[in-house]
Image: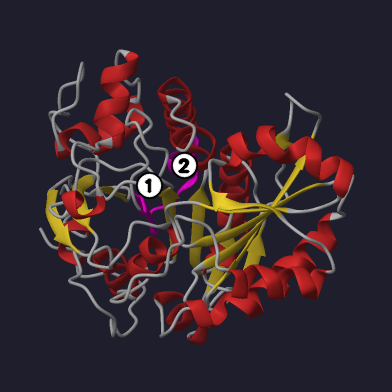
Amino acid sequence: MQSKDTNISKALLIVLDGVGIGEAPDAADYGDTGSNTLINTAKATGGLILPNLYSLGLANITPFPFQGPADRPAGCYGKAMELSRGKDTTTGHWEIMGLITEKPFAVFPRGFPPEIISVFESRIGRQVLGNKAASGTVILEELGERHRTTGMPIVYTSADSVFQIAAHEDIVPVPELYRWCEIARTIVDPYNIERVIARPFTGQQGHFKRTEQRKDFAVPPPGTTVLDRLKEHGLDVVAIGKINDIFSGRGITVPVHAGTNARGIDETIKAYHQIRRGLVFTNLNDFDTVYGHRNDPNGFKKALEEFDARLSGIINSMDDRTLLIITADHGCDPTTPGTDHSREYVPLLVYRHGMYGRDLGIRRGFSDTGKTLLKAFALPPDINGVDFIDFIFTNKT
């Protein structure tokens, strides 16, 4: 029986950063044939113990090693393919919120050209180290000690469109590193570079560790997003983790920093109880940054299981007018030779109390999620995508 009331009071949207679920149809174009973050991690580690995610329908999306599908999934389940050109955090999150990126951001696999680096060095009054594509942890071991003795910041990139600046917190105060990033942002804007990222770290040679003071300085969204619409209509929009950075503060009413998955989950539950009506939008980044990019499937497994263990607490805190959506922004398969993101489908799990679990199928575009949120809040769904509102408001009775 179809419910007549499809209006909700609160929504929790949790993005498991880098948790893909199988190569996208165009994965070969990105060098990602064979990537499957969830399934390959399960195979490499002897299986994933995710009872709460499985109960929502995760193993109903695609066959999982050592785990059968739920007979009666508690949630709606499916997967979504990205329409934007890219496989990065910004394009993925923007598309979830209704914006499709047609022109890919620029990448610099051989390092940044002199016209960028020389201007940056002149503006900050120091030469830089590195200027190449590298793993963040590897480059700290390579250049971290030299940075400590010279004060020269480490500049590096990756397969993504990022200008990253690493500096030891005892050598360069974090506010000064942020100021350098703001300078870099103005320099790289004409080059269509997606993000400038502050990468503060601590420790000594052999024991360098990046801290939770990371900050992203992203290109602002080029158009109206779901977040803008929610804010315009007086709804709360709480951004947890790096969501505020990804959207340059646009459409956000309350930004909340959270440098780890555990902190992000804590802040999600806290924000849920504090808002009257609106969206809590959370990015959990450890899957990607701590484990995916470091080719650590065992760590990835542990992070997934830790999230799953906390998921029951999230669900139990929800009232009957709350919608929970769990998805991802791209893949980051820790079992493949490379250390970069992978072009994959992303899982899509949707839950509210009293719903009847159904197969959402393959969604053509992440923005189906954003469009569904607008309709659930009874707002004009004037963004890209096809909503799945009828699926989630079909009751069990």
Q: From what the image shows, is residue 235 above or below residue 15? A: below
- Mark 2, secondary structure of its residue: helix
Q: Position of residue 42 (x, y in %)?
A: 29, 22
Name which residue lies at 75% across and 68% down: 121
First in residue order: circle 1 vs circle 2: 2
Residue that sits furthest to the front in the current view: 114
Span colored in magenta: 313-329
| For residue 222, side relative to residue 244 (left or right) | left
Q: Residue 341 got which mark?
A: 1
**Residue 93's image quarter?**
bottom left
Note whether residue 253 is visible. Answer: no
Q: Amino acid at mark 1?
A: His
Q: Nearer the viewer, residue 183 or 238?
A: 183
Q: Which residue is mark 2?
A: 288
Q: Nearer the viewer, residue 370 or 43?
A: 43
Q: Position of residue 79 (x, y in %)?
A: 20, 50
Q: From what the image shows, is residue 163 above or below residue 190? A: above
Q: Amino acid at mark 2?
A: Asp
Name which residue lies at 44% across and 20% down: 298
Question: Does the CB distance between marks 1 and 2 fall below 8 Å?
Answer: yes
Note whether residue 341 is visible. Answer: yes
Q: Position of residue 270 (x, y in %)?
A: 63, 50
